[in-house]
Amino acid sequence: MEVYFKSINRPNRMQDGSRINRHRNRRRTTVKKFYFLRRCASNDAIIRNFNSVALFLVLLSACAKSDSAMTAYLSGDFATALRELKPRDDQGGAQAQYILGVMYTEGEGVPRDYSLAASWFKMAAERGDAEAQFNLGTAYDSGRGVPKDAARAAHWYRKAAAQSQVRAQHNLGYMYTYGIGVAADHAQAVRWYRQAADQGYAGAEASLGVMYQKGWGVAQDHGEAVRWYRKAAEQGNASAQSNLGFMYHEGQGVERDFEDSAQWFNRAAEQGDATAQFYLGLMYVKGEGVDKDPVEAHKWAIIASAMSPPDRIRGNAEKARKLFKQTMTIGEIANARRAAKAWMAKHGGGK
């Protein structure tokens, strides 16, 4: 099996969101509430380590009640939130400036304006607000609201990362991995990935797994790569699930097990990971860890070619589709197309 190995997770933008459209709003709301909760909690360790939904809701309610602007914002009353926040901005309040940046980014109660959002984030960032520093870094990283500038992005990521902002730590690690805005330095990349991974951040756990598998900045260690992939995979990180599927398929760091490989590829594929979709299709063709099923194989090849950007995976998936069709009946091809169309309609993907 010629495996195209997935690389480091791409940098995270201002709001974490699933690639599956139907999950985006729910995740955005969860992330937003979590970071607002961190702002007003007196013991940040409690917030990082809580495992109770009930406790989360209690803390969130207590924090919101202590701040009328936050109460209004989290309840969706953006007009009231804006009215409450403006006087605080006049007094130079970093939290008010940060929330205003979010509102202009999302178009909540005000017209969406990325340039104004970046201005608010910059004011809060200069006062030391870690979330604003991260969001300003992503603005420079993507060129959204400000001229694209990788060096400035790295500068603001570094400030936020120094305050233990996990997404900034991960993004800074990514920049050191590939020399974006900074000189490439794999040891520094590992340092920042590890700091975020030690806080339980799945994206960094997956990226740290890549570093151990490739031997970048650390001694190559497939067993350690598997350990970090598993941590991220069990949190639902699709890239880690795909890479763990690869490790089980090739017997790297674990005993070769096609059934486990297929299961991890399937979990990633269902989340929209095109690499996993392609290789899951190959496993259905060969009957590795699953029963041979040309319809399932062709279905996943169709989905992978539709979901993947123009890269090696899309090219291979399109070649696989043509190859699979040569041994399929007209009915089987039609069934595969219907199944692929239904999957993409449900998950909001495809061309």
Image (tube, rainbow, N blue to C red):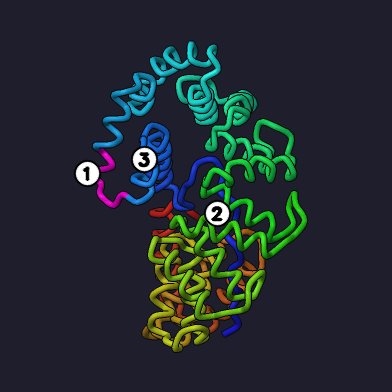
Vertical placement of 15 versus 62: above or below? Answer: below
Alpha carbons under labels 2 and 3: distance apart: 46 Å
Using residue 11 as the reference point, say whether residue 271 is left or right of it. Answer: left
Residue found 53% across the figure and 13% down from its top: 91
**Which residue has dot 1 on it?**
54
Q: Earlier in the sequence, mark 1 or mark 3?
A: 3
Q: In this view of the protein, which residue sits in the foreground, 329 or 157?
A: 157
Q: Which disc number belongs to residue 351?
A: 2
Using residue 67 as the reference point, say whether residue 171 is left or right of it. Answer: right
Residue found 38% across the figure and 54% down from its top: 346
Give the amino acid type for the residue marked by disc 3 in the picture.
Asn
Residue found 46% across the figure and 84% down from its top: 254
**Which residue has dot 3 on it?**
43
Residue closest to the far left: 54
Viewer-side label of 1, 3: 3
Secondary structure of the residue carrying numbered label 2: loop
Alpha carbons under labels 2 and 1: distance apart: 41 Å
Q: Residues within 10 Å of mark 1 (few under 14, many from 20)?
A: few
Give the amino acid type for the residue marked by disc 1 in the picture.
Ala
- Where is residue 183? Give x, y as percent: 77, 56
Give the amino acid type for the residue marked by disc 2 in the picture.
Lys
**Which residues make up the magenta segment?**
50-57
Secondary structure of the residue carrying numbered label 3: loop
Vertical placement of 188 versus 31: above or below? Answer: below
